[in-house]
Image: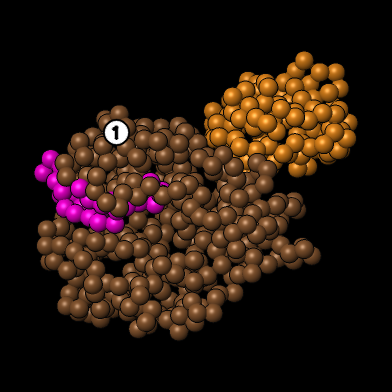
Amino acid sequence: MSELVQDNSEETGPQQLPLDSWHRERGGRMVPFAGYEMPVQYEGIMAEHLWTREHAGLFDVSHMGQLLFSGEGVDVALESLLPGELQKLGEGRMRYSLLLAENGGIHDDLMVTRLPANNAFEEDAGAFYMVVNGATKWDDLGVLRENLSDDIRIAHLDEQALLALQGPEAVTALERLVPGVADLVFMTAGAFDWQGNPLWVSRSGYTGEDGFEISLPADCAVAFADALLEQAEVKPIGLGARDSLRLEAGLPLYGHDIDLETTPIAADLGFALSKRRREEGGFPGAERILMEREQGSVSKRVGLTIEGRQPVREGAMVVDADGSEVGKVTSGGFAPSVGAPIGMAYVPTALAAPGTEITLAQRGKIHRATVTPMPFIPHRYVRKKG
Amino acid sequence: MSRYFTEDHEWIEVENQTATVGITDYAQEQLGDIVFVEVPEAGREFARGDEAAVVESVKAASDVYAPVSGVVTEANEALGDDPALVNSDPEGEGWFFKLSLTHPDQLEGLMDETKYKDFVSKL
């Protein structure tokens, strides 16, 4: 037997994250990912996936990059690289955005929050906290340093751990330990305290479920993860289920569904272009991106449901009637909550309408698929209190 | 009856000139939740090392090679409806296919259960 599909992260001497032994002690199977050793699964991807959809899953996402930006005019400065409305972003509010390249391609996708006076990082009000992908954080830092003026200070919070608690019971479990978090709504964040340790908690995540992301000092990460795991609702969840959950939620994965070759319009991330920014431009690649927004892009990211039971994976071809390649699958796998194989692909815009039947080719075999609206599983974000 | 094992984590149960082939408990444990198995049609002829089947977990697809040369006499159709049989009973009900051996001498190079256990313990 041989693995046909493997994690394609670089394997140049992976580093260990703060919770490394914690994962191993709990049966986590560790694999190299984004330069670190990370748990791919504990009891099994299927069980962990379903547990998160029904209860609460604890993910270690400490490999991700946590950055702080401060200085006079920091919002205007960041807007020169990101297409989101940051000048009017309220304190404690966050936004999904894109670090754009000059040609309209995407360096990274990220979450950015404007900090209030009371934050866990001892920063002044108005500074920005950003979470970027682990595999791209060093490149991102290069792009950011190169393009922001010296007046903007950038701090890489490499002594902070980052945990995600996701699922319908996440709020119950976390509120027990950290009273007050239940008052947050989706895409807001605030400072909290756990046994004297400063936490920065946002109601956000990447599974489609309600849940939280918690930034905390690395030296209290093990104790806090232990306290979470003592809650009956919580189990540790690995990268494998994180991937199947985000795929069902229709969320793109950087380096797979989006990269420097894809634009926000082709990637169907037009919502990340705030209204004022669309009207004013002034971000990298604006000319191309705004033109594509008006006239359409050549290809578009769509969701696929695959006929039969066999998963169609990243790299499979979308083919026309003659068998010529017209697009490609960028994510694919078996969706535990859907009970069928699903995927994401780039297809010519003419084939992007939901209901369109398309043909895929993988390892010499033809698979039939239907373009399907995403998310595959409805999002359950908590947008209002109560 | 004798059971043999390969370094690619296949098992081969031989009775007369027919071999039943599957993947080992160690292999299914490594793969995790099995969601699909593609088994070969009866009548196909394999040389040792040919790609004979595909097993897919939630995470990845893996080839299964013919551990010995032979002609497929039967595929395990039960795996179509219930691929998780490979997880629950890998070395029994979760078998993949049966081969009529064309080169029985190839069995000589394979491991027995004791040697395979020793092999796996060093991985």
Q: Which corner quadrant of the image does residue B23 belong to?
A: top right
The residue under label 1 is A229
Q: Secondary structure at mark 1?
A: helix
A64 lies left or right of A43: left
The reply to whether residue A97 is in sight is: yes
Note whether A285 is above or below A61 in the view shown. below
Residue B122, x across and y down, in percent: 54, 31
Task: Specify the chain shown as orange.
Answer: B
B16 lies left or right of A88: right
Task: Specify the chain shown as brown.
Answer: A
* Magenta span of residues: A183-209
- The residue that appears at 62% across and 57% down in the rendered structure is A355
Q: Amino acid at mark 1?
A: Leu
- Quadrant of the image for the N terminus of chain A? top right
Q: How many marks?
A: 1
A63 lies left or right of A227: right
- The residue that appears at 19% across and 71% down in the rendered structure is A70
- Quadrant of the image for the C terminus of chain A? top left
Q: Nearer the viewer, residue A113 or A188?
A: A188
The verdict on residue A69 being magenta is no
Note whether A120 is above or below B105 in the view shown. below
- The residue that appears at 48% across and 44% down in the rendered structure is A240
